[in-house]
Amino acid sequence: MADSNAGKIRVGIIFGGQSAEHEVSRVSAESVLQHIDTDKYDIEVIGINREGKWLAYKGDYKLIGTGEWESVAEDQALRRRAESLKLMDAKTQKSNIGSNMDLVNSARGILKNAGAEAGGRKLDVVFPVLHGTNGEDGTVQGLLELAGLPYIGSGILGSALGMDKAYAKMLFERAGLTQGRYLVFSRKQIECGIDGIADMIEDKLGYPNFIKPSNTGSSVGVSKAHGRAELVTALKYASRFDRKVLAEEFIDGREVECAVLGNDDPIASTVGEVKPCNEFYDYAAKYASDSGSSIIIPADLPPAVMEIIRDTAVKAFKVLDCAGMARVDFFVQTGTDKVLVNEVNTIPGFTSISMYPKLWEASGIGYTELIDRLIDLAIERYEDGRREYGFNG
């Protein structure tokens, strides 16, 4: 019988992870799997559970979003192991112990053991649908680099810079991009001198202000402080999620977002506006389907302001050495229409209600085509890297 997957590009979808955004990653992955063109791509799905275990998954994609995928994947792994042992005699099993250990201790081996290779054929490209730490911050990107696999999104540096809001702001400042005032503190500073830090924030930023971990996404660990008591609580809360904490001034303005797509010559989408149901666009406002939050695409802004946002989005993308995709978040100040860059998300949400795919849909690129373009960009970047390092084979 002919192989129906012969000639297809083999795409690995990796989701889950050990970050506080595990659930969002699962829902994003489910949405990607529902929209990817299976006539063009042979799909391998790999989930990372909260304990960091990598599991191949073959089953109903709807179980990924609910979390039920994990028990199914565990059962599948046990059956594969049992079948493998049946095919080996005792001598063969013993001789494979050493080689299996070598396999586990290599980057490609981790992926192979997780189901990334079948029939001797490795993945052609990987889509790490991973949000937050241990996935969006350059860690998994480093693993994929070591494994010699093309992958969607920014490289190690761009991923790390996009994830670390404090360093991103320092680079934006150096590049002359307009942004709000901010201060950065370490967890140790907060633990040893929280009253002095609160004094500094009050003096430099005033109230209200925002306190957030430097290395999380989806508004995890973020608080809006209106006074001293809330500020102290917010500092302690944010420091639970990261060793660096960012304090930002409150900007009276509209929250808008712009999607970027490309490698060396990226393009920007139209601009969308977020109208949160809560006091700010927190985790619940972003992801609860019944939250009452809304997005307006395109945003009701003057054309000149829209162009400034789109131009600045591309500049921010390049400043952080991003690749493939990113969503850049801004504030448009009330009364002045002044544009201030806030942050860059290198693996934006891909859920059915996420801004990134919706912005491109409004710009003429549908969800399925968007995935096609991201795969092409990943392979293009990989091939360019091979040329740079002299790999011509």
Image (tube, helix red, strand yellow):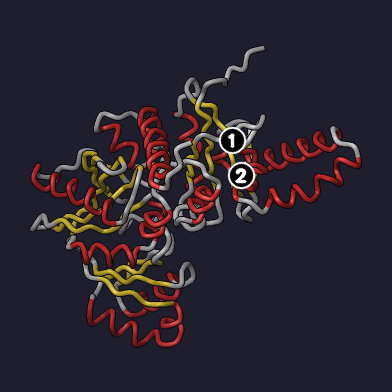
What residue did someone put label 2 on? Answer: 111
Q: Nearer the viewer, residue 365 or 5?
A: 5
Q: Is residue 267 left or right of residue 77?
A: left
- Circle 1 packing at 10 Å, graded few (<14), some (14-19), many (20+), is some
Q: Quadrant of residue 163?
A: bottom left
- Circle 2 packing at 10 Å, graded few (<14), some (14-19), many (20+), is many
- x 9%, y 58%: residue: 335
Residue 17's spot in the image, x, y percent? 55, 51
What residue did someone put label 1 on? Answer: 122
Q: Quadrant of residue 73?
A: top right
Residue 289 visible, this angle = no
- x 51%, y 42%: residue: 149
Q: Is residue 99 left or right of residue 276?
A: right
Type of residue at label 1? Lys
Mark 2 → mark 1, Cα distance in angstroms: 9 Å
Q: Quadrant of residue 297?
A: top left
Q: Nearer the viewer, residue 215 or 385?
A: 385
Residue 262's spot in the image, x, y percent? 30, 40
Residue 64's spot in the image, x, y percent? 57, 39
Q: Report helix, strand or loop for mark 2.
A: helix
Q: Report helix, strand or loop for mark 1.
A: loop
User: Does residue 164 sit above or below 295 in this rendering?
Assistant: below
